[in-house]
Amino acid sequence: MLTRSSRFALALLPGLAVALAACSSTPKPKLQDEFLSSDASPFMRTFGVSSAEACESARRALLSQGYMTTLARPDTVDASKNFQPASDTHYTVEFHVVCTAGDDAVNSSVVYANAVQNGYALKKSDTSASVGLSILGSVSLPIRSNSDAMVKTSSETIQGGAFYDRFFDLLTRYLQSAVRTAPVPGETVDAKLLPGDPSPLPAPALVAAPAVVTPAPPTTPVAALPMTA
């Protein structure tokens, strides 16, 4: 016969089993929930310039912050920057920018940017080997060596919206300071006289040059020779 305390313990078993199952289950990755988000994307921005001008300003913005460009094309810019907060820790930020044409292919563009932070840590490994000496028989001497190497420990896309806001704000500053040229409207340029200017002189008429006649040189008369019998 079950006592009151035994019945109470049995009643708690189903709830305890559910709680243990929830703790042991793998949590759902957060990235799957954020992939199809309806919020404004922090990775893109629209500008009222051509895609080539936007990418050139992005390249200058990254260079001004110490990034080294590894690829620079009219529609793509890749750059990287190194950080070392400690002697055994190293970080690399790889920045990738793509510029595409907007609704107006000439005066509009969409810039996409994303940055990946890679983490590296110093790892030490011990290796051992043995060397046999034939002159001493089967004696082997252990040899140990230590080798240090930077091992990649993490790689993550930077998600912070403030990080990309600062980049796009800097890109906008370089767009505002860039010198641009605009084509002259129309196919021809019309020249107009201002009030008070004298009327232009008519073009001089072409006059045919007179023909030059060279006189023939005078002939010298030949003296008559006397005739002999």
Image (cartoon, rainbow, N blue to C red):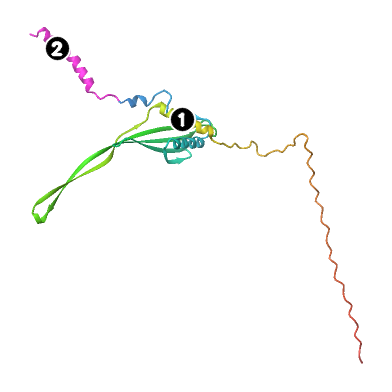
Amino acid at dot 2: Ala
Q: On the rendered image, what quadrant is the N terminus found in?
A: top left
Seen in the image, is 228 located left or right of residue 57?
Answer: right
Is 107 contained in the magenta span?
A: no
What percent of the width, then of the height, locates residue 197?
77, 37
Residue identified by numbered label 1? 168
Q: Is residue 205 above or below residue 42?
A: below
Seen in the image, is 85 located left or right of residue 228?
Answer: left
Quarter of the image where one finds residue 153: top left
What percent of the width, then of the height, locates residue 224?
91, 83
> How crowded is the residue under tag 1: few (<14 C-alpha within 10 Å), some, or many (20+)?
many
Q: Secondary structure beneath disc 2? A: helix
What percent of the width, then of the height, locates residue 32?
34, 26
- Residue numbers of the magenta segment: 1-28
The residue depicted at 44 percent of the width and 31 percent of the height is 167
Viewer-proximal residue, 184 or 141? 141
Q: Secondary structure beneath disc 1? A: helix
Magenta: predominant secondary structure element?
A: helix
Quarter of the image where one finds residue 135: bottom left
Is 13 contained in the magenta span?
A: yes
Amino acid at dot 1: Phe
The label number, if any, that marks residue 9 in the structure image: 2
> How crowded is the residue under tag 2: few (<14 C-alpha within 10 Å), some, or many (20+)?
few
Q: Is residue 1 above or below residue 85?
A: above
Dot placed on the residue nearer the N-terminal end, 2 or 1? 2
Q: CA distance from mark 2 to mark 1?
A: 61 Å
Seen in the image, is 182 located left or right of residue 33?
Answer: right
